[in-house]
Image: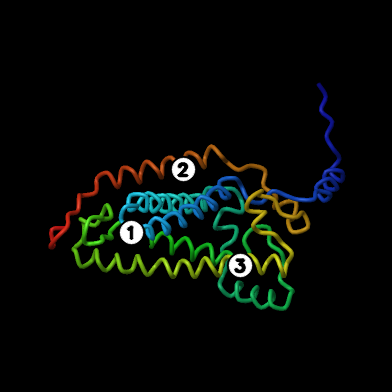
Amino acid sequence: MTVIDRPPETESAAAQSKEKRLVWDLPVRLFHWSLVVAFIGAYVTNRLGVAWFDWHVRFGYAVLALVVFRVLWGVFGAKHARFASFLRHPREAALYARRLLRGEAPLYAGHNPLGALMVVALLLGLSAQATMGLFANDEIFNFGPFAGTVSKETSLLLTSLHKRGFYVLAGAVFIHVAAVIAYVVVKRENLVRAMVTGYKRAEAVHPEDEITTSRLTLAATLLVVVAIALVALTSIAPVASAGGDGF
């Protein structure tokens, strides 16, 4: 069987003629929307009261597992998911912000410099929030799995920080959503649709920046490893009890 190679100039023309190009791999997209559900779920179940505490804990575990997975995916994932592809010096973010206000900001295939800072801030904030929840307690019935590993005073301090931390995160999420809306208005780039479909307009993505694989097997393996590690870690946690310093 003879294979006829397409001339290089024909391949280039075909690449340039595409209307959209794949940028966000499926694991990143699933992570993003799963995190949205887990974050909202943790908030709602907390507001519903102590009867929903078990579900609050489950959503908290989900947030923690997703954040750990995203950090690993930032090292091993597809091109635009890797931290090395989008982390830049804060000065570049400031320059991008000034150019954005002047309507001169360039398009980025992946995260722009400001978006990259928000990704890091949210990952750090969510990991801190979920971790503090592991040590929290309500002094009555409900305890985080590791509340028994610290003193009662430390547990109560982390509980207070855990409660306040939500509002800090909510503020960051509000800024994130506002920025996405502004990006649609100013740059005419629908980032929400891109995070659903994985595709961006071809004129915003250089042909060499289009990804060809989502590395699903690797992503599934990493997620399973993270889930097993979390289950194993929480299963060996000492049981906390109400009262005194018997934590």
| Other-residue count near label 3 (Cα within 10 Å), few / some / many at <14 / 14–19 / ≥20 | many
Reply above or below: 246 against 76. below
Give the label on residue 133, or none: 1
Of callouts 1 and 3, the N-terminal one: 3
Reply above or below: 222 against 152. above
User: Toward the viewer: 213 or 37?
Assistant: 37
Counting from the top left corner in percent of width and height, residue 243 is at: 14, 60
The residue positioned 54% from the left and 53% from the top of the image is: 32
Judge from the rendering whether residue 234 lies leftward or rightward of residue 4; answer left or right: left
Helix or strand or loop: what does disc 1 sit on? helix
The residue positioned 73% from the left and 56% from the top of the image is: 205
Q: Marks 1 and 3, Cα distance to the nearest angstrom?
A: 31 Å
| Other-residue count near label 2 (Cα within 10 Å), few / some / many at <14 / 14–19 / ≥20 | some
Helix or strand or loop: what does disc 2 sit on? helix
Which image quarter is the N terminus in? top right
Reply above or below: 159 against 9. below
